[in-house]
Amino acid sequence: MAKPTQIVPYLSPLLRKLKRGPAVTLPKDAGMIIAYTGIGKESRIIELGSGSGFLTVQLANIVKEVISYEKRKEFLDIAEANVKKCGFENVTFKHRDVLEPNAIDEKDGSFDLVFCDIAEAEKIVPHAHAALKQGGFLAAHCLHVEQAKALVLEALKTFGEASMVESIVREYEVRDFGTRPKHMGIMHTAYLVFARK
């Protein structure tokens, strides 16, 4: 009798076909971003830091529009190719450093989410606030606790609320006898910051 295969829970078929480049926002973190902010089919998103486009693809799969900024051309090329491979036409890419003055075009208060995956994310708080509609969210993927802390403290100056969380996933070995957590897994990947206008 053939041994049953187990599905690795980290990447969906959509994400498995993407080319990797810089570090990616994994589904465990993307799921929290989507669930905590309540974005859906009518939502408009600004993404600051396209990276490989992993989160771009996950967002484009469920929302109306994604505008994604990336300063590094080699990352932008990977992200654009990944979005094209998935067939999404609701993504616009912009090759810019969002920390430069007037780099972010969207300032009309009509967006539901500004997602940030850049160093010094606290510097974009005023721009995110201007782009978001009332009740909209700023969310960020921060690699270091100091970065997340700086963003929360800055966001609290203009946003109604702000918080920081992380997501830990434990995969289990499932056997006839002796089911237990696997010895290795994807534990801490990032601090997630959420601020609501």
Image (tube, rainbow, N blue to C red):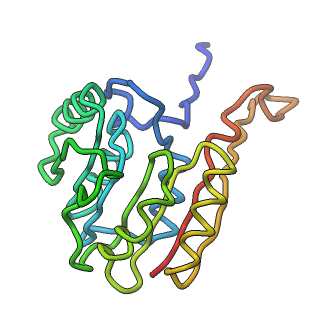
For the point 32% across and 28% down, which residue is it? Answer: 18
The answer to whether residue 152 is left or right of residue 11 is right
Q: Quadrant of the C terminus?
A: bottom left
Place of residue 38 in the rendered image (x, y in percent of width and height, measured from the top left): 43, 72
- Image: 25 above or below 59: above
Depth check: give the residue in front, 188 or 110.
110
Seen as rendered, the residue at the extreme right is: 178
* Quarter of the image where one finds residue 14: top left
Place of residue 194 in the rendered image (x, y in percent of width and height, measured from the top left): 54, 67
* Quarter of the image where one finds residue 104: bottom left
* Quarter of the image where one finds residue 51: top left
For the point 43% across and 54% down, which residue is it? Answer: 116
Depth check: give the residue in front, 142 or 146.
146
Q: Quadrant of the N terminus?
A: top right
For the point 26% across and 50% down, which residue is it? Answer: 68
Q: How many marks?
A: 0
The answer to whether residue 45 is left or right of residue 175 is left
Place of residue 73 in the rendered image (x, y in percent of width and height, measured from the top left): 24, 29
For the point 21% across and 37% down, which residue is it? Answer: 86
The answer to whether residue 22 is left or right of residue 161 is left
Depth check: give the residue in front, 86 or 25.
25
Place of residue 101 in the rendered image (x, y in percent of width and height, measured from the top left): 28, 57
